[in-house]
Amino acid sequence: MMILICGSSGSGKSKFTEDLLEKFKSEKKFYVAASKIFAMPDGRQDLEMLERIKKHKAMRAGKNFITIEREKNLGGLNFPESSSVLIESLTAWLANEMFDSNGGQEKIFEKIFDDIQTLKAKCENLILVSDDIFSDGIIYDDSTEFYRKTLAALMIKSASISNKVIEIFSGLPVYLK
């Protein structure tokens, strides 16, 4: 089974998805943390991201998830067939692949979607989390717009192969599929 969970920042996606992962009967439950702490233009670490990561780690404490911190090439991960896997998040994963100094934008959609399909085939349950970054009405620079369009395309394609699609709004799930 594949489930796509989406919602805005601070909507309650993480709590909902972790609760969902806990409910699966799988012997092994994996939490793949794709967030990366980027350096600020002045060289300092992103303190807001550090706090978010700290909060997420505290939320996972005692839940018996096997946490894997991996920023890119998630399709290369191996899981037992009977496992459940939560990817937190498609938004971070795409940014890491797209904006890494060794990365590139050519064929990024195909690479990540192939990885999603590979992950789906490797485990019993796959939960893919993504952020809704499309509602602010701001026009961004070309590379950010390309990122947003690529994320939208990945979400649409992922929704098409998912068994369930759920949007989290103010901590409440809205079942779309």
Image (cartoon, rainbow, N blue to C red):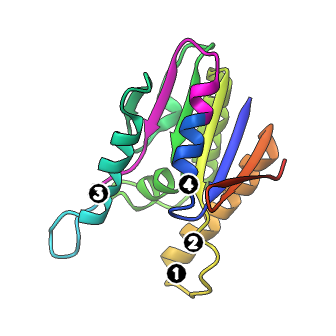
Q: To which residue does mark 3 refer?
A: 51
| Foreground disc of the pair 4, 1 | 4
Q: Please say if the residues under marks 1 and 2 sit with CB atoms less than 8 Å apart.
A: yes
Q: Quadrant of residue 22?
A: top right
Marks 1 and 2, Cα distance to the nearest angstrom? 6 Å
Task: Please say whether residue 29 is one of the residues in the magenta stretch.
Answer: yes
**Above or below, 93 relative to 31:** below
Q: Secondary structure at mark 2?
A: helix
Q: To which residue does mark 4 refer?
A: 12
Compare residues 145 and 125 and report the one nearer the observer. 125
Q: Which mark is residue 146?
A: 2
Q: Please say if the residues under marks 1 and 3 sit with CB atoms less than 8 Å apart.
A: no
Q: To which residue does mark 1 refer?
A: 142
Marks 3 and 2, Cα distance to the nearest angstrom? 28 Å
Residue at point 45%, 59% (across, down): 95
**What is the span of residues highlighted in magenta in the rendered image?**
20-37
